[in-house]
Amino acid sequence: MTNKEKYKQAFSVLQTSENYSLEVEKMAMLNKKRTVKAVAVAVAVCLILIGGSGIVYAANLGGIQRTIQLWIHGDQTDAAITFNSDGSYNMSYQDENGELIEADGGGVSIDDDGNEQALTDEELMDHLNDPEVEYEDDSTVWVYYYDQKIDITDKFKDNVCYVKVSNGDETLYMTIKYHGGWCTSPNKYLSPSNSN
C-alpha cells in the first residue's frame, strides 16, 4: 500500500460537520459584502473627483488658472491669471491697500498676409511685462517697469518725453507723448508719430 492510499484510508472516515459548511457560506457572504462596499466607495470617490473637476473647469471657462508673480506699479505681486484659447486673459490680484483688482486683456497678431492669430500665453506674458505709463490724480506722470518707479512729470518737452529703462537683461527706449500713448524700442528712441 502506498502513502497516498494510506492517507485516503485514514481520512475517509472523517466527515465535515454541517456547521462547517454554514460557516464557509457566511464568510463568503461577508467577503462579498465587503467587496461591494469597497467598489461603491471607489465609484463614489471617482464621481466626486470627476464632478469637482468639471465644476472647476466650468468656473474657469476652460482655461488653466495659474498664480504668477508680476511687477505691478514697481512692486512684485502675486496674480491669479487665466489664459484663454482665444488669445485673451483674465487676471486678479490684491493692490497695496488689499483691494481685489480684476483686469483682462488680450489680442491677436497679424501676419504679412493679413491673417489674424490669437496671441500665445508667452506673448501675453511679454505684454504684461511691458513698461506702463500712469497719469495720477495729482497730475504726476509715472513710468513703471519691473521694480522701477520713475517720475517723468517734469521731463516733457513739447508734450514728448524720452525715457530709457532696463530690467538687467533688456534695455528699452521709450518715447512718450503726454496723454497720447507711448512706444518702445530695444535699439533707439522712436519718433513721437510712432506712439498711439
Image (tube, grey):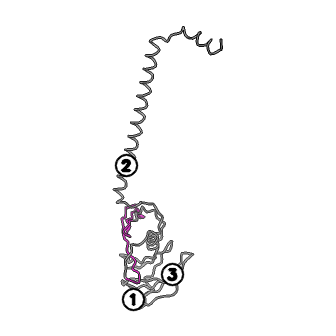
Q: In this figure, which residue is indicated by the disc labeled 3?
A: 172
Task: Name the residue rendered at 34%, 56% in the picture.
Answer: 59
- Work out which quarter of the rendered image holds the C terminus and state it: bottom left
Q: In this figure, which residue is indicated by the disc labeled 2?
A: 52
Mark in the foreground, 2 or 1: 2
16 over 113 or under it: above or below: above
Mark linked to residue 159:
1
Residue 155 pos. (x, y %):
45, 86
Asked whether 88 or 146 is in front, the reply is: 88
- State which region is magenta: 84-113
Spatial CA distance of label 2 from label 3 is 46 Å
Residue 13 pos. (x, y %):
54, 8
**Residue farthest to the top, as pictured:** 13
Question: What amino acid is at disc 3?
Answer: Leu
Question: What amino acid is at disc 2?
Answer: Gly
Give the mark nearest the N terminus, 2 or 1: 2
